[in-house]
Every structure is written in C-alpha cells, then in structure tokens.
Amino acid sequence: MRLLSRLRAGLLASLTTRLALAYGLTTAAVLVGVAAYLSSSLGNQLQARDEGELVGEVQLVRHLLREVASEVDIRTDAHRFADIAMGHEGLVLIVRTRQGEPLVTLNPRNEPIPQINVLPVGVSPDRSLLQTWHPRNGVPSPGVAALGQIGNTGEAVEIIVLSDAGYRVALMREYRKQLLAAVLCGSMVAAGLGFLLARRGLRPLRRMAGDAAAVTTSRLATRLDVGSAPAELRELAGALNGMLARLQDSFTRLSTFSADLAHDFRTPISNLVGQTQVTLAQRRTPAEYESLLESNLEEYERLSRMIENMLFLARADNAQVALGARPLDARAELDKVAEYFDAVAAERDLTLSVSGVATVTADQPLLRRAIINLLDNALRHAPAGSTVRMAVSRARPGHTAISVINSGPAIAAESLPHLFGRFYRGDPSRRNSASSTGLGLAIVDTIMRLHGGSVSVRSVEGQTAFELDFPDKVVSRVGA
Ligand SMILES: Nc1ncnc2c1ncn2[C@@H]1O[C@H](COP(=O)(O)OP(=O)(O)OP(=O)(O)O)[C@@H](O)[C@H]1O
Ligand SMILES: [Mg+2]
C-alpha cells in the first residue's frame, strides 16, 4: 500500500509523466467511448438481422406448406424444409400437426420445445411479435410459432422456429475483447508519445533551470535568456530576471553597507583603544583619567548614535517602521524645531528664520527627525553671522515642500550624487569627527521614501538648499 502511494507520488512529481498520463487517460476515455458505441451498434445490427431472418424463415415455411398436397408430402419432402435451416447454426425448426404429431423436426441439440403463443394463419409475423425462449446455454433467444396451411387441404399445422442467440453473444464477446485490446494498445501508444512530446516541450524549462542553477552570489549578474524562451515561459523568465536584478541590487547595497559599517566602527573603537592605551601607559592624575573618560564618553555616544541610526535604517528597509501619517501644520513643526535649535544657533552666531504656511501629510516624529537632520547640517555648514532659513509652501498641487537653506560654499558637484548614501561625508576630515555618523541624509532619504516623497539638493556658490517634497497621498516606497 505504502509502496503504491510512494510510487504514485514519485510518478506525479514529474510534469512529464503527469502530461504523459493525461494524454494516455484522455485517449483511453475517447477510445472507450468509441468502442462502446461501435460494439453497441454492431450488436443491435446483428440482433436485427437475426430477428429479420427468423421472421423470413416462418414466411418461407408457410410458403412451402401452400405448395405441398398433404401431410404425407411434408414428410417425404422434409429435406426441402430442412434446407431453410442451412447455414443457421443452432436453429430449431419444428412443423407439427395441431395434435402435436411431428412432421418436420430439426433440433440438432435436442432443445426442449417451449410453450409459446401460436400466431393465427392470417397474422404475418414481424419482429415485434417475436417471443423469448431459453435454450440450454441460458442465453435468452428469440423464437416464433405460427400456423401455416397445407396447400390442397387447407389443414392448419404449427410452425415453430427458434433461433439461438448464444452464437451472437459469443461473437460480440470476442469482438469486445479485441476492442479492449485495441483501446489498451492505443492508450499506451498515446501515453508514450505524450511522454516524448512533453519531454521535448519541457526542454526550455530544463535549460532555464540549468541557467538559474548557475547563479551564485559571485555571479549575480547572470540573467536568463528571455529571447529564446517559448512565449509561455517568457513571463516567468522575465519575472526571475527582475528578481535577480533586485537581489543583485540589494546584495550590492548590503555588501557596501557592511563594508562601510566595519570601517565606520573601526574609527571610534580605535580612538577608544588608542586613548585608553596611552593613558594607561603611566600613572595619571585623577584629572587626566577624568578627561580620558570624557573623551571616551563622546566616542561611546557616537557609537550609540550610529547604532541607533543604523537600526532605524534597517527597520525601514524591512518595512518595519509603522507610518502614522496624518495632516500636520508644517509651519508649527518648523517653529518647534527652530525653537529647539535656538541655543545652538546663537552659540554659533547664526539666525534662524521660518516662513510660509501649509499643511503637510506626514508622520510627526519622522517629519521632525528629517527637519532636524537637515537643520543640524545647515547650522554646521553656515558661516558665522549668516541666517539659516526654513520655508514651507504648496509648491505644486497635491504636494507640500519644506526647504532648509544655508549660505556657504557650494557642495562639490561630484559629491552631490553621494550625499544621501549611507556613511557618506563630503569632507573627509569629518570622518573622525565625533559628531558625524554620515547617516543623517540617508535617514532623511529613507523617511521621504517611507512617505512616498523625495528629497533634493541644490547647491550653488553661496547657498545650499535641501528640499523635502511630501505628497498628500502617502504611498510608501521602502526597499525600492
Ligand atoms: N547644508 C550643507 N552644506 C554643505 N554640505 C552639506 C550640507 N548638508 C550635508 N552636507 C554634506 O553631506 C554630508 C553627509 O551629510 P549627513 O548628514 O548624511 O552626514 P553628517 O552630517 O556628516 O553626519 P550626521 O548627520 O550623522 O551627524 C556631510 O558630511 C556634508 O559633507
Ligand atoms: Mg548630518
């Protein structure tokens, strides 16, 4: 039982055998239908012919009876009656007087003569008047009894003609056996051909599987050949290629990210190790230890900020950041951030200005985080004595624009495409700066993609402007 189910599971696991089986079974079903039709129509035809002959034989006997003169003639001419039965195997022909005295008896197998209704002289028998009798072989067969008249005397005698359907049934059984053998052979041939055709038809699929198997992390640029694939597989090949492209992109980003990550962790950690080693090299005063701890604390804070930022980016990449976007008063949000940065701006001799009024559809903490990151950069790069401006406007229908503008030297054109990349810092000297993680703008970019919006930068000599574009309808594009 278990072997059978395992065999079945094994067979059905292959598409080729499944198709071959389907071909075979469909052909078998069609052939069985055709065979059933043929055998039933042949059976009907044979039966009709047998019955027609039976009726004809009664008529013939009646005719012969009219030609003879008396019962005696019948006995002497019995062979003329016997001729009628020639060629009809198993046929029983009895002519007898009404008192039951036999005149002609043709009963090669000594069948018992059944009691059946006798048709009167005036009634000519037809197929509907045939009766059923049961020969010794048990196959119900047609028979007929009728009265006939002797020519001269007009005396009535009984004619009984019984045919044996056993021959026809045996013939049909043999015929059906042959048909069944033909159906079996035909179905097997169809299944075999189906197998070959399916194997041939599925060749492109096997080729595609081979191509796909050759894709490894070091060969992510490999693509499946869409052009030579058959139409049905082209869509699949295209979809797989799209998947490969996305995987390649994510894989490349992940590789660069982890390389940058290792690099960026190395700096604060080697600072910590270096400072601590130098301090421990000889005895120090408590003030020196305190200064070491303070300096270490800065690095710890930087590391913790980096980890926090990276966690945010990783969660956003995996669409794990829940976005509670709702309409907000953008001006109020800018004022709030400006107030928070007032002291820092004053310390650097900078003025903060906010202008414009508009509603923005955004997640409040994320919106603030994006503005803070931009303002933090602007305050850092604005020359002392200048003004850092923040503005909000309905730049185009369905969109709210928030910009943060500071004066200062232009950002190098070759840096612009990289500004929003992770760990990118325009000024290499800031690599070691404890306050920089190089993730600020990458986070702004991710926040904007979460909102279905975008961030852009324009930087010309004397002025740099970052602009956030928030659509009213939020459709996230994370991981894209
Ligand atoms: N307003 C600006 N003016 C000039 N350069 C800028 C400005 N904003 C950003 N940059 C450049 O873009 C780089 C990337 O900025 P980003 O905010 O991503 O990192 P960061 O400021 O160096 O670090 P973090 O924001 O994590 O403290 C900066 O190092 C700086 O070179
Ligand atoms: Mg920054």
Image: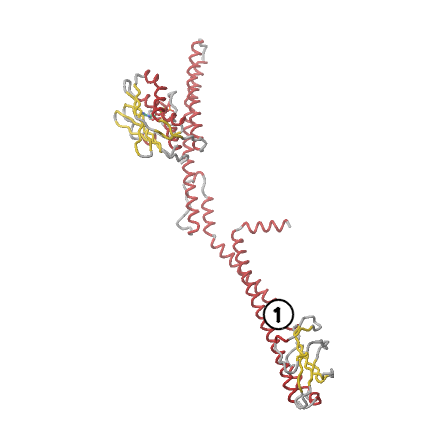
Residue pointed to by mark 1: 172
Where is residue 24 shown, x and y percent of the image?
A: 54, 58
In the image, ligand 1 is in what quadrant?
top left
Q: Is residue 191 visible?
A: no
Where is residue 252 shown, x and y percent of the image?
A: 41, 35
| Residue lying at the far left of the rendered structure | 461
> 101 or 290: which is nearer to us?
101
Q: How many discs mark residues in the rendered view?
A: 1
- Quadrant position of the C terminus in the picture: top left
> 413 or 183: which is nearer to us?
183
Where is residue 290 shown, x and y percent of the image?
A: 44, 12
Is 48 situated above or below 435?
Answer: below
Name the residue rendered at 54%, 62% in the picture.
30
**Picture quarter containing residue 274?**
top left
Q: Is residue 157 visible?
A: yes
Mark 1: which amino acid? Met
> 413 or 346: which is nearer to us?
346
**Picture quarter containing residue 479?**
top left
**Picture quarter containing residue 449?**
top left
Q: Is mark 1 within 8 Å of ligand 1?
A: no
Label 1 element class: helix
Q: Is residue 392 left or right of residue 173?
A: left
Is 391 situated above or below 186?
Answer: above
Where is residue 108 shown, x and y percent of the image?
A: 70, 79
